[in-house]
Image (cartoon, rainbow, N blue to C red):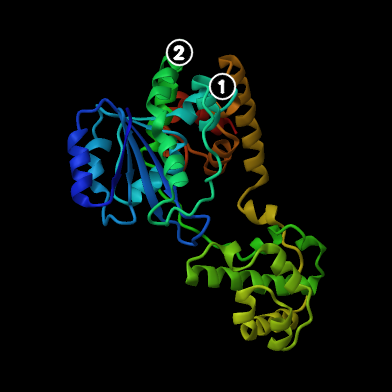
Amino acid sequence: MRELVWVDTLEELQNVVEQHKTAPMIALDAEMDSYYCYHTKLCLVQMTVGKTDYLIDSLALESLEALNILTENPNIVKVFHAGENDVPYFRRHGVEFKNIFDTHIAAKILELESKSLGGLVDIYFEINLPKDQSRADWRIRPLPPEQVEYARQDTLYLCELAEILQKELEEADSVQEAHQYFKSLEGLELREKSFDPDGWAKIKGARELSGLQRSILHELYSWREEVAEKEDLAVFRIAHNSALLSLSRKRFQQPDQLIGWAKNDYFRQDAPRLIELMNKGRERGQIPFPDLRKKKNNDWSAEDEKLFNVLRQWRNEESERRGVDPSRVLSNRQLKKVARKRPSSSESLASVEGLEAWKVEEFGAKLVELVGQG
């Protein structure tokens, strides 16, 4: 008989940790509020140990550091599915990790038919996980029963699944490779949200606008970001892209005109400011459509491209020799970073962002050699 325990005080959390500090394996997951908020917060932590499922209310707790007794213990396996999405949020709350097993990474290495948690649970246990709460609001308290069940099932099968996949990794002689990937999860940092002022150009339909309308859209796009950050709301909750496009085509000169047209509350509330911004866009005049590719690669030279092609050819040959997907040797993104930095030693190669230590050890000498030849 399984037990479900809600944890929302430090004393309760400490008791849970004390109870399981000798457990061989625990499963972890997390739910965030990114679908609702601008500044994403960790709202709920799910943890399964043996026959007990814990829902830990991270909104009610000032700290999660008590979990470190479990998470930093190298004798306890911490099981995640796609831990790269969760580990950075745990670390922001002072939780560090040793000895992670990631079922998503394992599935990729094993080249399984499905890599999703739902797909894997279906394959190995013939159980269909609920999918209807993926955009649920995890800030709600108390959580509705359907969200509780959804959250609980995110960790319910992970430990058993990890044991199965571990055996399959052993049979495929891929344990070392998998565990090197797992280890790379331990130090993941949370990427800070950054605003691209030219992001308006990525909106579907922006290319159909005139140069003057693009200038107006540029202003509206920046306004939405400013309001979303101030209100701590996801940007689409301030205004959908389609609403920004529609407004950029209008010739309103007075707030009353905008208010009479708008169905969007933020448009109506901020009508005077929006008219100012629309006028600012008109006064600036037509603007060209930015070359997003050029902007993204403004430090990418012809020499970089030539070296990248050399590295990619070697990578493809190496992956074919090993009989694995090329990304399991080095991804194109990693190759581009190496080509751009041109490391002259294993030490400088190790400083390339996003390059796992085991890949430096495994392929470092060859990469440095190829860079030197280039």
Q: Is disc 2 in contact with disc 1, using a CB cutoff of under 8 Å?
A: no
Residue 183's x, y, as percent? 37, 32
For residue 108, say whether it is visible: no
Quick check: 253 left or right of 166? right
Q: Quadrant of the C terminus?
A: top right
Q: Who is closer to the viewer here, 81 or 366?
A: 81
Q: Which residue is mark 1?
A: 112
The local crowd at label 1, few if under 14, some if 14 to 19, many if 20 or more residues have their Cα within 10 Å, is some
Residue ID at (58%, 64%): 237
- Marks 2 and 1 sit apart, C-alpha to C-alpha, by 15 Å
Q: Secondary structure at mark 1?
A: loop
Residue 165's x, y, as percent? 44, 20
Picture layout, residue 282 above or below residue 318: below
Q: Secondary structure at mark 2?
A: loop
Picture quarter containing residue 1? top left
The local crowd at label 2, few if under 14, some if 14 to 19, many if 20 or more residues have their Cα within 10 Å, is few
Residue 258's x, y, as percent? 71, 82
Q: How many numbered marks, from 0 up?
A: 2
Quick check: 234 left or right of 208? left
Quick check: 262 left or right of 179? right
Q: Amino acid at mark 1?
A: Leu
Picture layout, residue 14 above or below residue 175: below
Q: Amino acid at mark 2?
A: Asp
Q: Which residue is mark 2?
A: 173
Between discs 2 and 1, the one toward the N terminus:
1
